[in-house]
Image: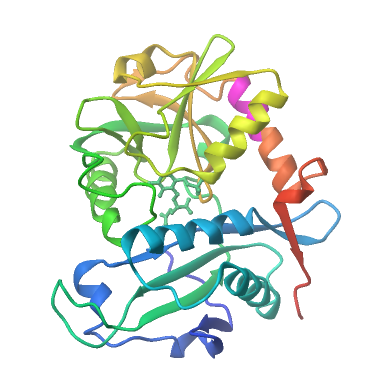
Amino acid sequence: MAGIQKSPWIWMDGAFVPWDEAQVHVLAHALHYGFGVFEGIRAYQRADGRSAIFRLREHMQRLSDSARIMTLPLPYSVDTLTAAVLETCAKNGLRSCYIRPIAFSGYGALGVGTLDNPTVVAIAVWPWGAYLGEEGLNNGVRIKTSTFSRPHVNSQLHKGKVIGHYVNSILAKREANAEGYSEALLLDTNGYVSEASGENVFAVIGDTLYTAPFSGPILGGITRDTLITLAAEEGIGVKEMSLTRDTLYLADEVFMCGTAAEVTPVREIDRRVVGSGTRGPVTKRLQERYFDVVRGADDRHDQWLSFYEPQS
Ligand code: PPE
């Protein structure tokens, strides 16, 4: 697997440091127990050549909310972090990139109950192509229902994007990949569809979209929210409800969405072909709307964009 493509600078605790120097001690608390929060954001070069970060403010607000619900002290305001992300993108000269802000419990004491370690905050950016492949974006991917469940709503705080939560996603993803699938679908502890290892999930049945309710064990995806808005504009109804796996098997179309995966059609689940077995028409329409908003010529949602000038 190709390694991460380095950029010149990483913002770390308020200053820019060269990529190779953005390091922490091996006894940093988060490395041992997963106590930290992060974000995944994308910047796109638009049709007019300008670069813009998609829904930056909402992502940084979610980072702050994640820290708050975890009781992780976050030493910077949403405003400061938002400005820092823009500066990091500009300073690294990237026209489009993936952005990874992270805040975690750093070096000091060890032990689960540690309270006083400093929080380390960093923002890194690098080019990242289609998360589940270009072919997947165009023709859909094959996924499998995981043998692992999304933890009960009282076991993890799913509205936070928390580092430690991702061990559950990794178990599911590695199992799915080892069996030749691109992605894992996780059910909740009642057996209903929650989300994929790194995406929210939608079913298209007739002219309506169905997706797991916000109240369940899912991340409140910003892409999910974006697509609900775009669907309404397209006259497509959206219902949030508990879905069984066989509802997905019988759906006309299924797709997954997230910042990294964007809008990825699902063509097969558990060896059952979904709908026509390729990207369906509603998925295609929403995918086109999404790409038009983030990087195309559709300027109706420019309030979602934060423009920056890449430095050469
Ligand atoms: N659920 C999970 C579990 C999840 O990790 C993501 C994003 C989403 C839903 C969609 O959220 P949003 O990006 O706000 O629409 N997953 C991020 C990390 C992927 C990774 O492998 O790292 C992402 O898409 O950036």
Q: Quadrant of the N terminus?
A: bottom left
Vertical order, 97 against 197 (above or below): below
116, 308: nearer the viewer: 116
Q: In which quarter of the image is residue 216?
A: top left
- What secondary structure characterizes most of the magenta part? helix
Residues rendered magenta in the picture: 282-287
| Viewer-nearest residue: 206 or 253 | 206
The reply to whether residue 61 is visible in this rendering is: yes
Q: In this view of the protein, which residue sits in the foreground, 294 or 67?
A: 67
- Rendering coords of residue 228 (x, y %): 59, 31
Q: Image quarter for residue 11? A: bottom right
Position of residue 185 in the picture relative to residue 78 (left or right): left
Whether residue 12 sits left or right of residue 181 in the image: it is right
Can residue 1 be spotted in the picture? no
Q: Does residue 269 appear left or right of residue 96 in this picture?
A: left
Q: Where is residue 44 in the image (x, y as percent from the top left)?
A: 69, 56
Number of labelled discs?
Answer: 0
Residue at the image position 78 percent from the left and 54 percent from the top: 46
Q: In this view, does 40 lie above or below 300?
A: below
Residue 194 position within the rendered picture, expressed as x and y whole percent measured from the top left: 33, 33
Q: Nearer the viewer, residue 184 or 70?
A: 70
Which residue is depicted at the point 66% across and 24% down? 232
